[in-house]
């Protein structure tokens, strides 16, 4: 069973890193479509360009071959540890996502969730919150006042919206009666009125919108990319180059995948396909395919928002979180609690 757990965790990490690489291509091409231009299409191998699919590979080679510059006044140990902390804790979250349910094969039960835990939600939220340390550490360790301001700005943003994330998910967790991600998916397997899936997006539509907004802010992506808006604002990773800089970029993609996975788990029925009973090895593959397809759809939605809305000012960003999303999420939580209490 240890080998099975190792295989599942390896799959989760490969899934995240693979999708993160694909997002580098999607980001270029989707923005090109929205802006009526061709987009990246120059990188090729043996004359083949494949619509720019080789550009993420070219990016990786470029970052690996660039000089790893460390400022003279930087704290070298912390400067090197910061990107590893940010990326590492984001990758830990992937191992807790329920990519599939439990299937029967060879007379045994096989769970497709890499790390099973009755408090899986707390694990994911805890790992996401620890990633803030990498942002602050990068700003502090760079020995630059500009980078330090960027790190503090990023920490303020991430902490603010993680509070919003938690309060939003509190309503969904109260409705499902569990902190176990797998149990939350199974709860959504029933039908309402005999035909409508009991997905969170139907039972918690306000929570879905609030969580999606707060999740986009936690990942520091446009229109919430103030900590890293290099064209106008000095970011926390201004003193990073090469693969260390690439690790920070990869962290944003991995965090987007984690947020999308939570959206799918709590609001889109997880790996379930309505009206289909998935069992056996083929059912397991269908679970993985369904979960992956839903995650990709949410990622495309986040990308669409990224290339549609303008960047917020920092006061607007914090005001949106503390003055709008948090009160609405708390009101939604109280309404859900009363509904669960009055109509069990």
Image (cartoon, rainbow, N blue to C red):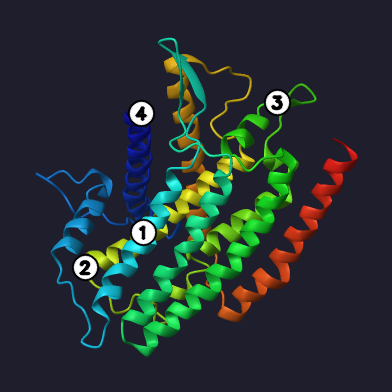
Q: CA distance from mark 1 to mark 4?
A: 24 Å
Q: CA distance from mark 1 to mark 3?
A: 36 Å
List the residue tagged with mark 2: 242
Q: Nearer the viewer, mark 1 or mark 4?
A: 4
List the residue tagged with mark 3: 190
Mark 1, other Cα within 10 Å: few <14 / some 14–19 / many ≥20: many
- Residue 239: quarter of image: bottom left
List the residue tagged with mark 4: 4
Coordinates of residue 327 in the picture (x, y in percent): 75, 65
Q: Earlier in the sequence, mark 4 or mark 2?
A: 4
Q: Nearer the viewer, mark 1 or mark 3?
A: 1
Kind of element beneath mark 1: helix
Q: Earlier in the sequence, mark 1 or mark 4?
A: 4
272 shown above or below 248 = above
Residue ID at (23%, 43%): 50
Q: CA distance from mark 4 to mark 3?
A: 29 Å
Q: Residue furthest left?
A: 46
Q: Earlier in the sequence, mark 1 or mark 3?
A: 1
219 shown above or below 99 = below
Coordinates of residue 100 in the picture (x, y in percent): 49, 30
Residue ID at (26%, 74%): 77
Kind of element beneath mark 2: helix
Residue ID at (43%, 45%): 94
Q: CA distance from mark 1 to mark 2?
A: 15 Å
Mark 3, other Cα within 10 Å: few <14 / some 14–19 / many ≥20: some
Is residue 36 in sight in this rendering?
A: no
> Which label is found at residue 87?
1
Q: Nearer the viewer, mark 1 or mark 2?
A: 1
Q: Nearer the viewer, mark 4 or mark 2?
A: 4
Foreground residue, 302 or 163? Answer: 163
* Number of marks drawn: 4
Label 1 close to label 3 by CB (< 8 Å): no
């Amino acid at each position: 069973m240890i080998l099975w757990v190792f295989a599942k965790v390896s799959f989760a990490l490969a899934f995240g890193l693979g999708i993160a690489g694909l997002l580098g291509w999607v980001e270029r091409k989707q923005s090109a479509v929205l802006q009526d231009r061709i987009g990246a299409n120059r990188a090729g191998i043996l004359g083949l360009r494949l619509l720019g699919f080789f550009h993420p590979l070219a990016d990786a080679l470029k970052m690996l071959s660039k000089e790893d510059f460390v400022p003279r006044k930087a704290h070298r140990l912390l400067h090197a540890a910061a990107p590893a902390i940010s990326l590492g804790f984001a990758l830990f979250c992937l191992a807790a996502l329920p990519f599939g349910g439990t299937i029967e094969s060879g007379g045994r039960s096989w769970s497709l969730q890499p790390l099973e835990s009755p408090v899986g939600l707390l694990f994911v939220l805890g790992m996401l919150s620890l990633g803030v340390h990498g942002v602050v550490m990068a700003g502090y360790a760079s020995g630059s006042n500009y980078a330090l301001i960027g790190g503090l700005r990023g920490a303020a943003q991430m902490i603010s919206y993680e509070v919003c994330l938690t309060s939003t998910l509190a309503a969904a967790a109260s409705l499902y009666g569990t902190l176990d991600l797998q149990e939350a998916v199974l709860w959504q397997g029933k039908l309402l009125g005999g035909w409508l899936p009991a997905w969170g997006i139907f039972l918690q539509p306000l929570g879905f919108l609030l969580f999606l907004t707060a999740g986009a802010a936690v990942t520091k992506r446009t229109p919430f990319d103030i900590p890293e808006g290099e064209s106008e604002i000095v970011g926390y990773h201004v003193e990073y180059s090469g693969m260390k800089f690439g690790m920070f970029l990869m962290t944003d993609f991995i965090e987007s995948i984690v947020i999308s996975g939570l959206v799918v788990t709590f609001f889109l029925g997880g790996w379930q396909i309505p009206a289909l009973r998935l069992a056996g090895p083929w059912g397991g593959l269908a679970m993985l395919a369904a979960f992956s397809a839903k995650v990709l759809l949410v990622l495309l939605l986040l990308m669409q928002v990224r290339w549609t809305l303008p960047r917020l000012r920092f006061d607007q960003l914090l005001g949106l979180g503390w003055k709008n999303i948090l009160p609405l999420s708390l009101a939604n939580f109280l309404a859900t609690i009363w509904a669960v209490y009055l109509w069990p």
